[in-house]
Image (spheres, rainbow, N blue to C red):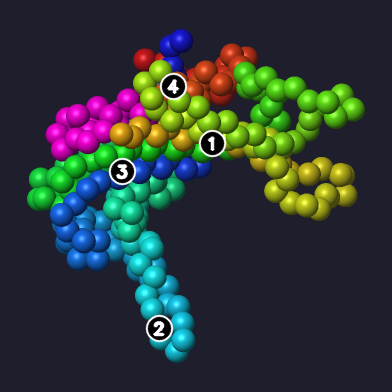
Amino acid sequence: MKLPTKITPDRIRDSIVQVFFKSDIPFLPLIGYFHSYLSSMSYEYISEVKEKEKKNIISLDFLNHLFVNTELGVKISLHPTKSIIFNCTGNYIGWSKYNIAIIDVIGKFIEVGLIREVVRVGVRFTSEFPNINILEKVNFDYHYQIDKEKIKSGKFNIEYLDENNCRVILNIVSNAPLNPFTDIKGKVDTLSLIDIDIIKEKFTHSDLNKIKEIIFDTHEKQKRVFFSLLKKEFLDELNPEYD
């Protein structure tokens, strides 16, 4: 199947790329190094430190350290699991630009010794479809015995390993109500979601070219799963563009 390069509008709500790594530097001092290098790459640090009070002691919860590059449209979160989480700040900027931004950051951190090895990559894209019953638009077969009525809304979760030992997690949400109240015409606005998470793990690489290849292949797998899921007649309605 030839995959489209894009659809219009792109429908993407979240475009998360998460890179897990090993480092010889503990997480807390690592934050300072990340801050220095990301600042030099035009990422602005946004403090989201939360204060908690336990037995009259104020503790700091370092769970989210956010850096934003407004010009690129990319944001980065650092997590204590020693992972870097990339996402777009607003509209999806397209894989070509997004991939370059990701590789630039990972490459810099490897170059200066903050990352010793990359050990896991996850690519998770969530696409939204307002006022569409997505169950009628996808190649997804399900069986049920509930008075043989047609399912109007629902949530389905599937997880499997592909032939390359990539973990594929597929979530489909169909016709979730955005507002529990109907208007005077009885219309309810709904939202359907296709959420695809591809995880490549059980590897260890410090070579940037190999890491770049893994990130690219993981994204391609996510893209292949998404477009293979859509019925052809529905895909044709989404203004697909091909190289």
Above or below: residue 242 compared with residue 134 = above
Q: Along the polypeptide, which appears first: circle 3 or circle 4?
A: 3
Disc 4 target residue:
162
- How far apart are labels 4 and 1 at the CA level? 17 Å
Left or right position of 170 against 86: right
Name the mark on residue 195.
1
| Tag 1: amino acid | Asp
Query: Picture coordinates of residue 89 (x, y %)?
Result: 40, 50
Of 70 and 61, nearer the camera is: 61
Name the mark on residue 19.
3
SS category of the residue bearing label 4 = loop
Residue drawn 38% across and 63% down?
Answer: 63
The residue segment tinted magenta is 203-219
- How far apart are labels 2 and 3 at the CA level? 31 Å
Of 139 and 70, nearer the camera is: 139
Name the mark on residue 58.
2
Left or right position of 96 against 114: right
